[in-house]
Image (cartoon, rainbow, N blue to C red):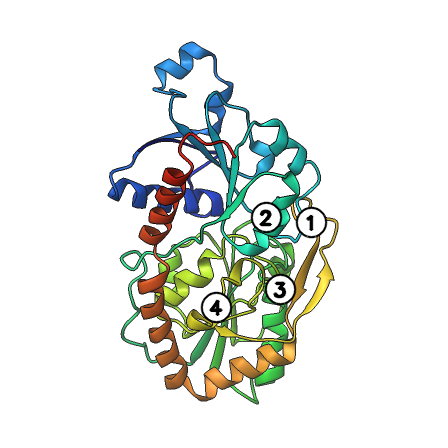
Amino acid sequence: MQLNWLAYQYREWDGYGRFSSRLIRALLRFNVDVRVHLHEVANMPEWMQIRNDVTWDRLTISCLPSFYLNRVPGRHWLLSMTEGSRLPVGWCETIQRSGVERIIVPCRHNADAFAVTGLPVHVILGGTDPEEFPIITGRPDRPYTFLALADRGARKGWVEVWQAFYQAFGTPTDTPDVRLIIKSRPDGNEMLELIARADRPDPRISILMEDMDMRTFYQMGDCFAIPSRSEGWGMPHREAAMSGLPVIVQAHAGLDDGYTGQWALVIGGGRMEAIPSHFEQIAGDWMKAKVSSLAGMMLRCFMQPQTAANFGRGAAAWLREHQTWEIAAQKLIGLIGEHNGVDH
C-alpha cells in the first residue's frame, strides 16, 4: 500500500501534527509506504515536485484544517476535525472545490459536522502509545495535585476547573494540602498571564506558561481535570489516562467515543452554549461543565486517592487493549482497502 501524506506541520504541540506523526509511525510498522510532505508541495511547479520525490500515482491523505486544503492530482482523501458542532464559514466550500473523495474524522461528533459537504465521512478514533506514555510509578511525597490545560482561551475548561477547585477546597486555610497546576503555551492565554502576575496569588495554584514535554507534565500530578467544552482530537485526555492518571472529562464532542467511561471519570450536567464569535475557526455550540459536578468529582478523588489511582491504572489497561495507534492504523488500512479505486 502506497500513500502520500500532506500536513501543514508535524510539530508535537499541534494536534494535526501530533495526530499525523503518530498515525504515520503506526502505518510504517505495518509496512505501508508513506511519503511525508508539507501541504505546500501541491502548489509547487512540476519540476520541484519531481525534485522533492512527489508523485500523484498513489492515494493522497491531507491531514489539515480545511482552510489549508489544496486540490491535488490523483485520488485525494481528507483527514480533519473541528471542535465545534458546525463547520466554520468557508470550510464546506473549500472541501467541495478540492476534489476530495472521502473525509476521515476522529469522532462521531465531527461526522455530523462534516456531513454537510455531501461526501462520505468515516470515523477513525485516534490512539495512544503505551511506550510513549508508560504508567507513572512511584508517587512523590507531595500534596494531592490536580492538573489542567489552558491552551487557546477557555475551551479546555480551565475556568471551570478553577471555580471547582475553590468550591471543593475553599481557601488555603480550609484545605492547605491540595494543589492545582494549570499549563498553557507561552503565548496561549492572556487571562492566565495576568493571574500569574498577581501580587498575592494562592500558594496552592501554579501556572506554567511554557511548551514542556507532556509526559513530564503528567508526572507532576495525581489527577487530570480537563472538562473540555469542545474537542476534536482529544489526545491529551487519553494520553494522561494511558499514563495511569485518573482523568475527569465531559463525554462530549471528541471525547464521546462510546466508551468514555472506560478510560475517564465522566461528569454530567453540562450546559450547551453558543461558541463566542471571536473563536474564528470554531463554530456552533459547545458544552460548559457544571461546576458543582466537577467540584464533587475532584473532591472525591482527593478524599479517596487510592480509589482514583486504581481507576487510572484500569483505564490505562483498557486503552492499551482498545485504543492504540496500531488499532487506528489497521482501521485506516482496512478503509483504504475497502475503497481502493472507488471514489464514492
Tell me if residue 312 comes above or below residue 82 in the rendering. below
Tell me if residue 194 comes above or below residue 88 in the rendering. below
- Whichever of labels 2 and 4 marks the residue nearer the N terminus, that label is 2
**Distance between the alpha carbons at the discs numbered 3 and 4:** 32 Å
Q: Of tags 2 and 4, which is closer to the observer?
A: 4
- Identify the element where label 3 is drawn: helix
Q: In the rendered image, which residue does mark 2 sit on?
A: 82
Q: In the rendered image, which residue does mark 1 sit on?
A: 283
Q: Of tags 1 and 3, which is closer to the observer?
A: 1
**Distance between the alpha carbons at the discs numbered 1 and 3:** 28 Å
Q: In the rendered image, which residue does mark 3 sit on?
A: 195
- Identify the element where label 1 is drawn: loop
Residue 7 in percent (x, y) is at 46, 35
Q: Work out whether residue 312 or residue 200 is closer to the camera in this orientation and state it.
A: 312
Q: Of tags 3 and 2, which is closer to the observer?
A: 2
Amino acid under disc 2: Thr
Q: Dot 4, how many residues are within 10 Å of its Cα: few (below 14), some (14-19), or many (20+)?
A: some
- Whichever of labels 3 and 4 marks the residue nearer the N terminus, that label is 3
Which disc is residue 260 wearing? 4
Residue at image location 32% in from the left, 76% down from the top: 140
**Distance between the alpha carbons at the discs numbered 2 and 4:** 19 Å
**Distance between the alpha carbons at the discs numbered 1 and 4:** 24 Å
Given contact means CB atoms under 8 Å apart, are the residues at marks 2 and 1 in contact?
yes
Query: Which quadrant: the N terminus?
Result: top left
- Identify the element where label 2 is drawn: loop
- Whichever of labels 1 and 3 marks the residue nearer the N terminus, that label is 3
Residue 14 in percent (x, y) is at 48, 46
Given contact means CB atoms under 8 Å apart, are the residues at marks 3 and 2 in contact?
no
Residue at image location 53% in from the left, 81% down from the top: 297
Q: Work out whether residue 171 or residue 82 is closer to the camera in this orientation and state it.
A: 82
- Whichever of labels 1 and 4 marks the residue nearer the N terminus, that label is 4
